[in-house]
Each structure stands twice: as C-alpha cells, then as structure tokens.
Image (tube, grey):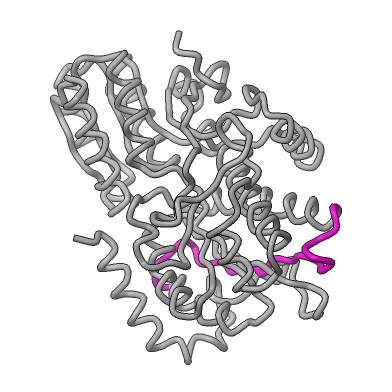
Amino acid sequence: MNIWKKALRNAAVAVTVAGTLLGVSACGLGGDSASSSSSDSDTVNIGVIYPKTGQYAEYGKLFQQGFDLAVEKVNKDGGVKGKKLGLKYYDTQSDAKQDAAVAPKLVSDKSVIAVVGDYASPASSAASPIFQQAGLVHYGFNNSAPTFTDTGDHVWTPQIGQDVYQKANADIVSKKAKKISVVYIENDWGKQAYQYFKEEAEKNGTQIVYESSYLPDSTDLSPILIPARDAQPDAVVNIGYGPDGALVINTLRDKLGYTGPFFGGQETSEFLDNAGKNAEGTIITGSFSATGTKDAKAQQFVKDFKAKYGNNPGNFEVTAYQAIIDLAYAANKTEPTREGIQKALQTVTDFPLYQGNGGTFKFNTKTRRADNIDPILLIVKDGKFVQYDGE
C-alpha cells in the first residue's frame, strides 16, 4: 500500500482549487521577495519549495544558506551553458496543501528548469504528481522516504533512504544496548522509519521493551516517556525531528531522571540549543561531517560556507548545496532546459559527491535514487556534532 495515498489525494484537491490560489500572495503561497530570481532570458531558474516560516523554519534557514552559496559558486564558475542560474523561492511551511497549491505556479513558469524541496516527504509528495504530469523534474533532495520516487520518472532524490538510515541506526544501537524503549513521531515518515528500525533491531536480537508514537505538535511527552523509563531499557531511541528530539531528551533527563544512553535528534543548532547539556553523547545517523570529511571539494565547501556564514555546515546545509550543484552539473552536461535536466539525471554517471566519503555518484534509473551514498554516524561532543568513530 502506498503510504502517500492521503498526500496524493490532498494534491488532487489542491489542484482543483489552484486557479483561485495562483493570484494569492499570502504567507506560504507567494514567491519569496528575497529570492535570487530573474525574468531575464539569459537566466534560468530552479524552483525552491521550502519552509521559510512555520514549525520547520529552522530547516528552511539551513537549506537557504546551502542553496544561495551553491548558486554563487555556479555563477562564479560560468553559470549553466552561458546562462546565469537563479532561484525562485516559495514558502510552503512544508505543508502538503501548500505544496500542491504552489506546484502549478512553478509549472507555468517557463524559466524554471527543475524544482527542489520540500523538507518533509509527505509535503513533497503532494506536489510530485503535478510536476510529473508537466514533465518538470522534482528533485526531493531531503526526502528519505523510500517510496518518495514512486510517483513517476520525473521524481528523483539523492537522499539516503530511511531503509538504509534505520539499518545503520539499529546496528549502532545494538552495540550499545540489548533492550530499548522507542518513541517515534506520528506521521507517515515516522511510522515508516520506525518499521525499518524495528525490523533491523529484531534481526540484531535487540529487544524493544516499550514503544509509542507521539503527535508532531506535542508539548508534553511525559505520559509516554514515564513508561518508557519504567521499562528499564539499556537505551532510549527517538525517531523524529530536531524539535521533538530535544523535547524527548529534556523530559527524560530533567523531569524523569533518566541517565542512560539516548539515540535521537537531528544535526541542527536548534536541537543543540534546546537540548543543551542533555544532548551530550547523543548519537544519530547522518551523511556528512564538516570536521571529518576527507574529500577535497567538500573541504573547500566547508571553508567557503564558514567564510560566508561564520560557522561550519551540517547535513541539511550540504544536501541543499549539493542539490543545486547537481542540477547545474546536469544542465551543463546536456542543456539548461527541463528536458535537459531529465536526460542528464538518466545518463550522467559522475555527479560530484560532497556527502559521505565524497567522490562521485550516479542514479539508479529504476529507483531514481543515488546508488552509492552511505550514511555515517555523528555524536555530540562538547556541544557539537562530530563524526563518531565507534569508540
């Protein structure tokens, strides 16, 4: 059963009312006035659907830093086939209905040669059918749901799938604990990710002594974390996002007196700031380490990012940066058109890879996912995420 059926149904409803929404410039539906876009015929654009505002705004900020730095690099290096590259931003709050409503606007803009985003897979998947029907590449660079690309042949992602992430997650947990309590976010992504984790945990012989989901907008998780603690686990695992990860660990440490190992959260300053000292020792799966990468171009990216923004980039910044680099590379290998982007994703075998161990990558044309990007482990030490060496 396709877990995105509900999201796709929302997309169909949104398309029906799209005609009345196209003229709306309200929050979440209008183009970002600060976008680096142009109507000049010498400029081609990539559309961006992302959460500038709303509950996921922290991710939108990180993405925009990566996007903007990538465009600067592309244009400094000559653009795409002599044309300048621009971005057209649309704030969707990573909400499925807003994504579906914005999609027709991007389809009708002939300067847009591809679309990147959104943050959450359910939101992205609400827009995918519209892009698919129009023959416009939807590059879901952050969408780790393994079923994300099921919509059609114009839907692609270089993101590591949750099936792969959660295998790595369950494997490291099994080295630290024999019995665990698990809490996970109650949405399609969270339920699917937990199933992958649970299957691998069972293979490893890890006993799940307690499990519970929680709503994305929860503010008090004590009712489910008290029994999670009382099950006397060797470790607690959280499968969710950064804000709820901080809520989980803070509740466990500050209110419930839990002192054991914790696996969860995300590599954002929001998570580290909210969790504070409680984040120390937290282990997560990721795809990039600014301090651990040995790849020369990735090291240059870190240097350029720090010079522009004053801090090292994390997983969300690098995946956003790479998304623009990927599509510019595609346009230069073929042509800066919608058809050219699709052809390049189908045929190019040496996309520059900044994540993992660096090098290059290519796409599996059947799954439309990257073939050779592997996850890494990250741990919080002295208030920062660093690559975990297994010790």
On screen, residue 368 above or below 358: below
Along the viewing direction, whichever of 311 and 87 lies nearer the viewer: 87
Q: Residue furthest top?
A: 391
User: Residue 36, percent across and down?
Assistant: 75, 66
Please identify the quarter of the rendering in which residue 45 is found.
bottom right
Residue 133, percent from left and from top: 44, 79
Residue 181, compared with residue 19, is above or below; it is above
Find out whether residue 78 is within the magenta segment.
yes
Q: Residue at x 26, y 15 (%)?
A: 177
Is residue 301 visible in this depiction of the protein?
yes
On screen, residue 205 versus residue 386, left or right, reads: left
- Write the residue at 34% across / 80% down: 12
Residue 109 vs 35, above or below: the answer is below
Mark count: 0
Residue bounds of the magenta highlight: 77-97
Left or right, 75 with respect to 265, comes to right
Furthest residue toward bottom: 19
Q: Position of residue 69 (x, y in %)?
A: 74, 50
Do we see residue 53 in this rendering?
no
Q: Is residue 5 above or below residue 219?
A: below
Quadrant where the N terminus is found in the figure = bottom left
Magenta span includes 90: yes
Residue 312 position in % (x across, y down): 69, 32
Q: Of residues 279 and 139, which is closer to you in this image?
A: 139
Query: The C terminus appears in which quarter of the rendering?
Result: top left
